[in-house]
Image: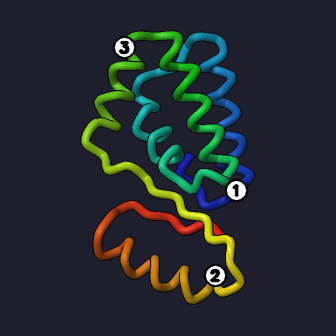
């Protein structure tokens, strides 16, 4: 799951998804899934991890409580989409402000 190879990551997430669909999700996987789920929203691995966590949480109150405990106290992720021709200048300016004031902050182009 911590491989730098995208195919291995995909396979790992698919394996966890299958286990989750069988109702056999282990709470030991929550930190790993939370790491993937905190990625960019447009990343397929992020979407897969969010779906896995959602499915696991609906199957088990224990998993639901643990996921909630991981996310409690985390700052919300802010996504900004800029729809102008001078996106590069605005993006650099916003990135600097995000780094200084709010974390995490992700600028989508």
Q: Which residue is mark 1?
A: 6
Mark 1 vs 2: CB contact within 8 A: no
Work out how far the residue at label 2 is from the one at label 3, CA to CA, in angstroms.
44 Å
In the depicted structure, whether residue 80 falls above or below residue 28: below
Percent of width and height locating residue 69:
29, 30
Q: Nearer the viewer, residue 93 or 57?
A: 93
Q: Which residue is mark 2?
A: 87
Residue 44 versus residue 1: which sits nearer the camera?
Answer: 44
The residue at the point 71 percent across, 41 percent down is: 11
Image-based side of 92 in relation to 15, left or right: left
Sequence order check: which comes first, mark 2 or mark 3? 3
- Mark 1 lies on a secondary structure that is helix
Which badge, 3 or 1, comes first in the chain's sequence? 1
The relative height of residue 21 versus residue 35 in the rendered view (above or below) is: above
**As drawn, is 64 to the left or to the right of 89?**
left
Bin the neighbour count of mark 3 within 10 Å (Cα to Cα): few under 14, some 14-19, many 20 and up. Answer: few
Residue 35: % across, % down: 46, 47
Q: Residue at x 39, y 81 (%)?
A: 96
What residue sits right under mark 3 in the picture? 62
Image position of 39 with respect to 54: above or below: below
Q: Nearer the viewer, mark 1 or mark 2?
A: 2
Q: Secondary structure at mark 2?
A: helix
Quarter of the figure that contains the N terminus:
top right
- Residue located at (25% from left, 42% from top): 73
Q: Residue furthest right?
A: 7
Residues at discs 2 and 3 in contact (Cβ within 8 Å): no
Q: Earlier in the sequence, mark 1 or mark 2?
A: 1
Q: Label 2 neighbourhood size at 10 Å, few (<14), some (14-19), many (20+)? A: some
Q: How many marks?
A: 3
Nearer to us: label 3 or label 1 = 3
Residue 68: x, y in percent?
34, 28
Vertical placement of residue 6 versus 107, above or below: above
């Amino acid at each position: 799951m911590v491989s730098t190879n995208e195919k291995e990551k995909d396979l790992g997430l698919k394996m966890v998804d299958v286990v989750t669909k069988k109702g056999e999700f282990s709470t030991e996987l929550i930190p790993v899934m939370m790491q993937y789920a905190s990625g960019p929203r447009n990343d397929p691995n992020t979407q897969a991890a969010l779906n896995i966590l959602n499915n696991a949480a609906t199957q088990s109150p224990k998993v639901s409580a643990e996921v909630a405990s991981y996310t409690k106290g985390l700052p919300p992720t802010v996504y900004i989409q800029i729809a102008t021709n001078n996106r590069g200048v605005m993006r650099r300016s916003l990135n600097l402000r995000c780094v200084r004031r709010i974390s995490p902050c992700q600028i989508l182009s």
